[in-house]
Amino acid sequence: MYDIVQLSDMLLTELKDVADSLDLKNYKSLNKQDLIFKILGSQAEDEEEEEEEEVKVKKPRKRTTIRKTKSKSSKSKVAKKK
């Protein structure tokens, strides 16, 4: 992943190679500044897609509660009191 400083230090031909490796379209006629922003935008979109995939994978499990059943002896005591 590239940041704006790294991209600014690159030559236009190097930026075009980066754009090609990222499978960007319509980058050949862009000037250096526009190409830098196109590369940064593409990287940001890729990060969002990866985060969405992680969220889909890490679904929280539903909590289940276990209820205690009353024993027979306590039921008979309640019945006797009535």
Image (cartoon, rainbow, N blue to C red):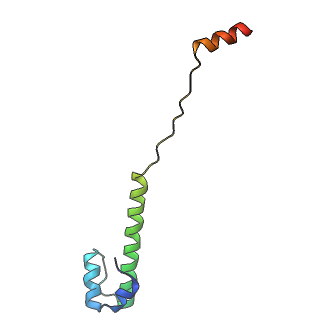
Q: Nearer the viewer, residue 35 or 65?
A: 65
Q: Is residue 69 above or below residue 72?
A: below
Q: Hey, which residue is sitting farthest top in the picture? A: 80
Residue 58 image position (x, y, % from top left): 42, 51
Residue at 42% in and 62% down: 51
Q: Is residue 40 above or below residue 75?
A: below
Residue at 39% in and 68% down: 47
Q: Quadrant of residue 11?
A: bottom left
Residue at 25% in and 83% down: 17
Q: Quadrant of residue 29?
A: bottom left
Query: Which image quadrant: the N terminus?
Result: bottom left
Residue 19 image position (x, y, % from top left): 29, 80
Q: Nearer the viewer, residue 42 or 74?
A: 74
Q: Quadrant of residue 33?
A: bottom left
Query: Which image quadrant: the C terminus?
Result: top right
Residue 20 image position (x, y, % from top left): 25, 79
Q: Is residue 68 above or below residue 64?
A: above
Q: Nearer the viewer, residue 67 or 26?
A: 67
Residue 31 image position (x, y, % from top left): 35, 91
How many numbered circles does the render carry? 0
